[in-house]
Structure formats: structure tokens, C-alpha cells
Image (cartoon, helix red, strand yellow):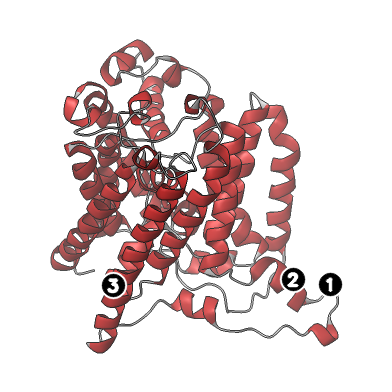
Amino acid sequence: MENVDRSIEPNPIKWDKAIGFVLFFILIIGAPFVLPSNMHYLRLLMGLALGYILSRSYTGFAGSVNRAYKTGSTKLMRTMMFMFLITAIANVTFLMFTKDLTIYALSINPINLGLILGGLLFGFGMAFSSCCATGVMTDLATDLPRAGVTLIFFCLGVFLGFPLQATQSWIKGSIATSATGKKFAQGIYMPDWFKWDGLDGYLGAVILTALLVSFVIYLSYLYEKKRRQKDTYSGVPSERVQDSPQDEDIANFTMGSESTYNVLFKKPWTLKQGAVGMTIIFVLMMGLTKSGWGASTPYGFWFGKVLNIFGVSATSLANFTHQPAAVYSGPFLANGVTVQNMGIFLGAIIFIFTAGLFKQTMHSVSTLNFKSASLFALGGFTMGFGTRLSNGCNVGALYTPIAQFSVSGWIFLAALVLGGIIGNKLSKTIYGY
């Protein structure tokens, strides 16, 4: 999520803070009466937490590439690598002693042409829209025009990509697999390479993941060093605020003071604090839902639901997309990931209100013209369509596979970065930004 710095200006109004807390308590108390199951309620809570964390730590997967290209700062990319590693290590506690790994929905995605093309398209779209599959939900709360156009065309891209994802061998098949990978989506599961290591392959998988993380961090430092030496480094305002020390007046501490409130609800969290927070939620997902973090598939369902409202039968939609008819004709909140995605949006709203940043955020909202709208539309479509080729998005094809020791995640990362570079270059050349 690309954010305008909203953290340091004083806020003279207090009603927005109250709205934030009222919204939070309405959701916590009222959601169990609306949602179809306890699992859906858990999905909402995890989504709220993710939206709040992403917003308060000014973090987003798209920024890992976009910030580096536009400002020279690789701090977010390095932090993402740190998050991938600690999440992978935490996941060992679930996976190492599990005799039947199929109780988990592991994202051991296939390695194929679709993975590479999807990564390129997704990175390309991230550069155009300045957000990703999860960032578009938080950005709906901070920049509705940009995020709204992006989301509409993201949904269209996913919907039109469903038939290819379901039928094409270059998306479903894999050029290489492993023993465990064959039980899932035919990808390669790193622990299968190291069964001799004394820990059923997980020691070797963690070490290999750490080496790959270290290599990306090393390249990031080299790139930032080059930008600084060429005097093309500008940095990211929100990162400077996050890193600047802010003394807490502990000597005059009172629970009801403005300074205490700011520490509790407004002060930006650092990128690493955000990474740790997201790792905790990911681990909860693994334990409670037996799967990792996914986001993009329901966007295609949303587009189909709109068509269904306008008269296209659920059966026709199912035949076209190779998805169950119920996802188009059933209740909107029946899908757990849909509930989680809505939670991400609401979590971002709660942060904006409770931090007293509503007025400032509204003043920073961009205006649309044909040029910018076309940019965001193209970005949304290429991201959405790309997810069907790569069998996931920034979380479903990148974060979750890497954290679950799938080789596919690292290939997607390389394609994503390359696509982001190409997208940023084209955006600058064609659109001027």
C-alpha cells in the first residue's frame, strides 16, 4: 500500500476517533449474528487485524518493488524477506510432526509458464495501480478513486482468467515436482530435498530459505547503495517518520493523556513491527484454518455475482468459469476469504478513525481523470488476470508458498520484481508518473 504521510499532523476533531471505536465494537459484537459460522467470524477477526496492521505500519507488498524503483529505498523489501523467513520458521511447528500433510491446504504451486507470466503481469499491474490484491482493500479506505477503479478491473481480470486456470496445462501442470508436491498442486516442496538432515528435511529447508532471503537482502542493499551513490535516492516519507525516535513523556504519564492515546492508537508502527504482526496472524491462520493467506479468488466471484444480479444465470457463470454455481447465487458472505477481505478493508477504516486521521486522509484523496483511470484500470486487470495464471497473488503465490517451503514462491518473486520494473518504466514513459 502506497501511503501519503498522515501521521504527524495534529488532529483538532475527536468525533472520528469515537466512530472508529463504535465501528469496532459493532463488528465484534454484531458479526456473530450475521456471519454463517464461527470460522467466518474468525476470518473477519483476522482480516480486521491484517487491515489494521497493514495500515498502521504503512506496509504493502506492492511497495516493496515500487518504493525501491521510485525512491531507491529497499527497506520494505528487506522487511518482507524478514517476514517470509520468520513465518517459514514458525510454520515448521505445524508441519514437521504432521504425518499427513494433506490436512493442510499447502500452496505448493506448480512451476510452469503460467507462474512466470502471472508474476510478470501482477508486478506490472502493481506498478500501475500502486497496490496489490490485499493493498487494494486497505486503499479503498485511503484512496477510493484509485482503489475503486483498480478493484473493479481486478475482479474482471480474475473472472476472465478462471477458464484458463481450470483448463490449460501450462497453468495446471508443472515442469518439476517432488514427493510431497505431488499430493498438492504438483510443485516442489523444499523439505523433500533434505530428508537426510535429521529433521525430516525441515532443517535444510529453513537453511535454504534463509540463504535465499539473505541473497535478496544483499541485492537490495547493493541496489540502494547504487542509488545513494548516484544521488537518485529520495527515501519514503512514511519510513522516515516510522524510524524517527519519539520520546514518551513517561514522567508525566497518565492514562487519559493525548500523548498516551497517540502511543496506543496513532503512532506509526515500524515496518518490522508490522511484519511480526502479520506473521502472528499467518500462524493463527495455519492453526485455525489449516491453510495460509489467500485473497484474490473471491474477486472473480464478486464480478460474477454482479452479472448474476443483472440476469446472467449462476449455471451459465459456472459453466464459463468452471467454478461452483453456488459462489454466484449464494450469499455474499458465504465465502470465508470474502469475509476476510472485507475485514481487511474495515480494519484499515478503524485505524484511520481511531488514529484521528479521517480529515487528513480525505484531503489527500486523489482525483481521477481519463489518464489516471486508464492507468489504474490496466493495473487492476493485469493483476487480476495474472493471479489466474500464477495460481495466486502477492499472498497466495508469494508469501504463502514461500512460508510453506514451496519453490514456486521464489520464482514468482523474481517474475514479480521484473514485472514491477517494466511496469514502472512504462508508467513513467507513457503516463509521466
Give the x, y percent position of residue 382.
24, 45
Quarter residue 428 falls in: bottom left
The residue type indicated by label 2 comes to Tyr
Which residue is at a point 57% across and 65% down the rendered structure image? Answer: 273
> Foreground: 356 or 164?
164
Image quarter in which the N terminus is found? bottom left
Give the x, y percent position of residue 5.
48, 73
- Circle 1/circle 2 CB separation < 8 Å: yes
The residue type indicated by label 1 comes to Gly
Residue 145 seen from this side: no
Image quarter in which the C terminus is found? bottom left
> Foreground: 362 or 107?
107
Which residue is at a point 44% across and 51% down the rendered structure image? Answer: 206
Residue where numbered disc 3 is placed = 70
Instruction: Give the SS element for disc 3.
Output: helix
The residue type indicated by label 3 comes to Lys
The disc placed on residue 256 is 1
Instruction: Give the SS element for disc 1.
Output: loop
Sequence-first tag of 2 and 3: 3
Residue where numbered disc 2 is placed = 261
Looking at the rendered structure, the number of numbered marks drawn on it comes to 3
Query: How far apart are the alpha carbons under marks 3 and 1?
Result: 41 Å
Disc 3 packing (10 Å; few <14; some 14–19; many ≥20): many
Query: How far apart are the alpha carbons under marks 1 and 2?
Result: 7 Å
Disc 2 packing (10 Å; few <14; some 14–19; many ≥20): some
Foreground disc of the pair 2, 3: 3
Which residue is at a point 34% across and 48% down the rendered structure image? Answer: 149
